[in-house]
Every structure is written in structure tokens, then in C-alpha cells.
Image (cartoon, rainbow, N blue to C red):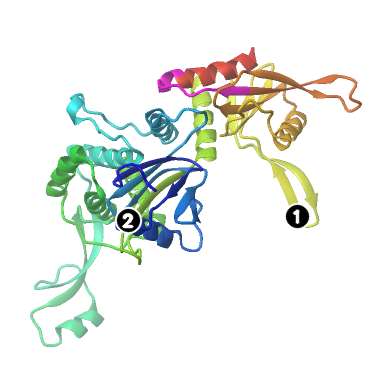
Amino acid sequence: MIQEDLKHIIRFEHEKLVFDMQVEEERKLYEALEAYHGEYTPFFKLIRNGVQFCEYVGVLQVGTTIIEILPKADKSRDASVWQNILINMIRSVWGFAVKESGTSNLKLKNNSVLDLYFELFVSELESLLHKGLIKKYIRQEKNAKALKGKLSFAKHIQYNIIHKERFYIETTAYTVDHRLHQIIFEALMLIHKLNRNAVLASRIGNLLLNFPEQERIRINGKTFDTITYDRKSQVYKTIIDIAELILLNYHPNISKGRRQVLALMFDMNALWEQFVLGLLRKSLKDFKVSGQITKRFWKGNSLSSNMRPDIVLYGNKCTVVIDTKWKNLNGKSPSPDDLRQMFVYHEYFEATKVALLYPGEGEQIAGQFYLKDQSGFDDKHCYILQIPADRDFAVWKNNIVEKVVSLLN
């Protein structure tokens, strides 16, 4: 049974959320999640009277209820710490620079992942309006009283057989009513509908008043496939990316209870890998930092297999291979599969050292691989790096970099 406010529920990855089916609001919430789950979703699995979350983290908004699923890599259950880590990791990976008001009572109170995306969208749109919206030439077909442009003869006959004073023409117009603005308008209308943050509500209202009315369009994946950016429209890329994420992850037609679902979820393993890769690229200027380098490993007839470590650091005198793992060892050894994988990386990339990088508490371990005859150790080293979470995100980033730098000296 849910203990906290049904309007804002917090759980950690891999935890369960069980509902009391005798309570109508909880039963309807479960039915909406069950309908959204459908045949398969990677975000959670159905259990008796509830759901169990997987390795995906982020936020699900079901009707007016927000369910936050936070990462967790140690024993701490301080939600504010892990919420801060998740939001800042997302900001770091995608380069989001969300403006925060200097007035304390105007700052976002919940500061959830959902608020992060809505705030980013609102800030980007405010900036675009301040700079001035771009216009584009668009093709138009319309009935007109003057022949300006190209006469569409077939449609002229179809529509104007009894209206001799009209012309059905094809022309171009230089206007703000074009595809980029139509997408932004659809996202703005959806955010206005979904937003539960009082601070953002007034800013969204101002945008609705100041943004020009657009032709309403249906949004699907193909809508974004045809978008190209030129020198003038490049400034729209961030807001269109956010609009795409929000619009394509919104599911309005939930049959049971008819509650809309917005799912902004991230694979924590992939997010951790991308975060560490980006951090090392910015911090280690004397090294070439590469991600996902593929080498051929095996082939048989039409089948093949490759190897691809997460991060490879190339220096003048050393090569270091790092694999990131979003899990807590809890004082145990890494899995044999992970260690065997690092041994192969050592061989194929001619690495000076290899390392497994984990979040969570634990000492740095300098390990070696045995010789084949078990008589001792060879010169292949595999290090275990563990970085406990810190409430101060800048300190946590510095600790990660320092741990990696210690391998390079």
C-alpha cells in the first residue's frame, strides 16, 4: 500500500510499488499503469497488485500523479541526494543549461526530472521570443479574389465553377506559421495541460499569450525525421529536441480510467556511461578520450561478434580501458564475466591498465590476473574504482576524475 501522497510518489530503481485495491484512487492508478504496460515496457514489470521498476529511472506522470524513480547505488535512502545526482547527470550528458531565478521563492520547489524538462522548454522558448521568431517561406493553396501566383487549374474548376470572381492559386508566404513553430506550439499546449508546478504556470501562461497561434498538426516520429536546420534555425535545435521527447512519450489514450501517461525514463547504465565519458573528455586534456571503440572478435560463417569497451584513454606512455557499471558491489568481488571481459580488453587494446568503475562505497582495489600455470601474477592489472555519492555534485565529479587520474600516474 502506498504510504505517501498519491500526487507525488518516490521510489528507487528495482523497488516495488504496491497498491491497495480497496482504495479507489490507488486502484485506478494501478489500472492506468497496467494499461500503459500493455504487452511490454522496459520501465517496469507487473506484479500482484503493483509494479516493480527496472534499471530505468526518471518520471512517470499518470493523470495528476507524478511517480519519480530515482537511481540508488549505496545504502542511503536520501531521495534529495539521488534526485540531485540524476538531474545533474542528465544536465551534464545533454548539456542542458536551465536558468534558475535569483529570487529564492521563484526557484522550482520539487526540482523533479519533469520540472527540469518543462523548465528547459520554457526557458528556451522565452529566449527565442526575446531574440525574435524566424519566418519561413511556405507553400499555400487558397481561393483568392485576385490572381497572384500560380493558378491551380484542376482545383480552380473544382471549387470555382460557379464563382467566376475567384481564383484557386498556389503561392508562397513569408510567415511565422511553419513546421518548427507548429511543433513548439503543440509541445507548449501539452506542457500547459500537464504542468503541476505553480512557479512555471505563470510563465507558461505568458508564453501562450505571446506565442503566435499556429495551425494544429498531428505529431508522430515522422514529424521530426524531415526537419533540417540552417544557419538561422540552428538555435531551435534544443527546444525541438525537448519537444520531441515530451510529445513522443505522451500516451493520451489509456483505456482504463482514461488517464494520460507521460514517461521520461532513462537507462541508468547508459546514462552512467555517457556521464563518465563526457566528464573525462572535459577533464583530461592531455589524453585522447574515446568511447565505444569497436574491434572484431570472432566470426563464423555469416555470424560475427565484436568487442566494445565503454571508454579508452590514450596517452603518450599508457593506454587505459574503463568499463562503467551502475551497481553497488557491497563488499563483494566483481562478477567473473566482468573480469574476463576486462582481461580480453587488456589483450586486444594492448592496455597498460584496465578498470571497472562503480558508484557506491568501497575502497580502490588494485588487482592482478593470474598466470596460466597459476604460479604467480602477470603484468596485467585490473583496478576496481568505487566512488560514493556526494550531496555536492561538483565534489562527486571531482572524486570521479581523481580516481581515474590515479590510474594514469
> Left or right of 312: which side holds 243?
left
| Horizontal and vertical percent position of residue 174 | 20, 55
Whether residue 389 is in magenta: the answer is yes
Residue labelled with disc 1: 303
The part of the chain drawn in magenta is 385-395
Between the residue at mark 1 and the residue at mark 2, the CA separation in whole angstroms equals: 54 Å
Element class at badge 2: loop
Identified by mark 1, the residue type is Leu
Q: Residue at x 21, y 50 (%)?
A: 192
Pair 1/2: label in front: 2
The amino acid marked with disc number 2 is Val
Q: Residue at x 19, y 30 (%)?
A: 106
Q: In which quadrant of the rendered image does the C terminus lie? A: top right
Q: Residue at x 41, y 62 (%)?
A: 35
Q: Is residue 155 left or right of residue 402?
A: left
Whole-percent x, y for residue 80 in the image: 37, 29
- The residue labelled by disc 2 is 23
Residue 39: tell me if it is visible: yes
Q: Nearer the viewer, residue 371 or 362?
A: 362
Q: How many marks?
A: 2
Under circle 1, the secondary element is strand
Q: In the rendered image, is residue 230 in sight? A: no
Q: Eyeballing the image, is 21 above or below 114?
A: below
Image position, residue 25 (x, y; %): 30, 55
User: Residue 231: image x %, image y %?
Assistant: 33, 41
Specify few, some or many for label 1: CA neighbours under 10 Å numbering under 14, 14-19, or 20 or more.
few
- The residue positioned farthest toward the top in the image shown: 409
Which residue is at a point 28% across and 42% down the rendered structure image? 118
Pick whichever of labels 1 and 2 is earlier in the sequence: 2
| 214 over 209 or under it: above or below | below
Q: Nearer the viewer, residue 205 or 69?
A: 69
Residue 370 covered by magenta stretch: no
